Image (cartoon, rainbow, N blue to C red):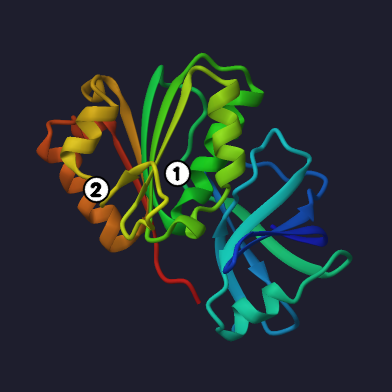
Amino acid sequence: MIFETNVVDTIQRTPDIKSIRFEKPQGFHYLAGQYIFVTLGDDPDQMTKHFTLSSSPTEDFLEITKRLTGHPFANALASLSAGGKVSMMGAYGDFIFKGEYNKVGMLSGGIGITPLRSMIKYSIDKKLSVSIILLYSNRFENDIAFRDELEDIQKENPNIKIIETITKPGPDWKGASGRISAEMIKEFMPDYLERTFYTSGPQKMVDAMVSLEREIGVPEKQIKQEYFPGYD
């Protein structure tokens, strides 16, 4: 089903990552982790892309979050402002979280954080008792999308723990460093065999993380994955 909607706000998350918020159309429903297709302008063949919603179904707006790559679609999206109109279709996808697990592990890199942010926010708003541990990898400190929000979330919610790791840390970085590894998973998730894992990000990163999960013995039924096929 196609919905028409308006931009209500834009938020610069990092120097090259931006969130666009839209009015939630009447009758539109989705699950945390699902994606939509967004069309800009009048040429759906050229200006349609799919985006995982970074908003939670509990919020009264829809939000997508995009790395600004300089490609035509990214530039058109970046130029949107309040009142701008888009059309969308959805929601789709089975990389979802409905609160059905007591313990969750999340592994993500870069813009792959978007479905996980939706799931974390959903669990908070629904007051679920689920334990969530997120390992979130970025190249540089200023690449961390939703950084302030994620840090506030774990301060206010004892069931949620966020570990940010940087592969090219600066001299003042005090957190974890390096790529997510089996040792890192074991250190921060000692009960990892009891957790259902959600992994999202670029395909190469997701493939590597799923291999790690299998290597350390996570049962296949506890592995859920979603990769992002490009950033145009």
137 and 211: which is toward the camera: 137
Hey, what amino acid is under mark 2?
Met
Image label count: 2
- Distance of label 2 from label 1 (alpha carbons): 19 Å
Answer whether residue 31 is visible to the viewer in this image: no
Hey, what amino acid is under mark 1?
Asp
Secondary structure at badge 1 equals: loop
> Looking at the rendering, in which quadrant would you find the N terminus?
bottom right
Classify mark 2: residues with Cα within 10 Å, few (<14), some (14-19) or many (20+).
Answer: many
Q: Earlier in the sequence, mark 2 or mark 1?
A: 1
Answer whether residue 24 is visible to the viewer in this image: yes
Residue at the far front in the pictured view? 171
Query: Is label 2 or label 1 in front?
Result: 2
Label 2 with label 1: CB-CB less than 8 Å: no
In the rendered view, would you say 46 is above or below 229? Answer: below
110 and 114: which is toward the camera: 110
In the rendered view, would you say 231 is above or below 221? Answer: below
Which residue is depicted at the point 68% across and 52% down? 63
Q: Which numbered tag is attached to residue 209?
A: 2
98 and 65: which is toward the camera: 65
175 and 158: which is toward the camera: 175
In the rendered view, would you say 164 is above or below 228? Answer: above
The part of the image, by quadrant, that contains residue 79 is bottom right
Which residue is depicted at the point 39% across and 42% down? 174
Classify mark 1: residues with Cα within 10 Å, few (<14), some (14-19) or many (20+).
Answer: few
Residue at the far top in the pictured view? 129
Percent x, y for residue 46? Answer: 60, 85
Secondary structure at badge 2 equals: helix
Which residue is depicted at the point 38% across and 41% down? 175
Percent x, y for residue 39? Answer: 68, 72
| Label 1 sits on residue | 94
Percent x, y for residue 176? Answer: 32, 42
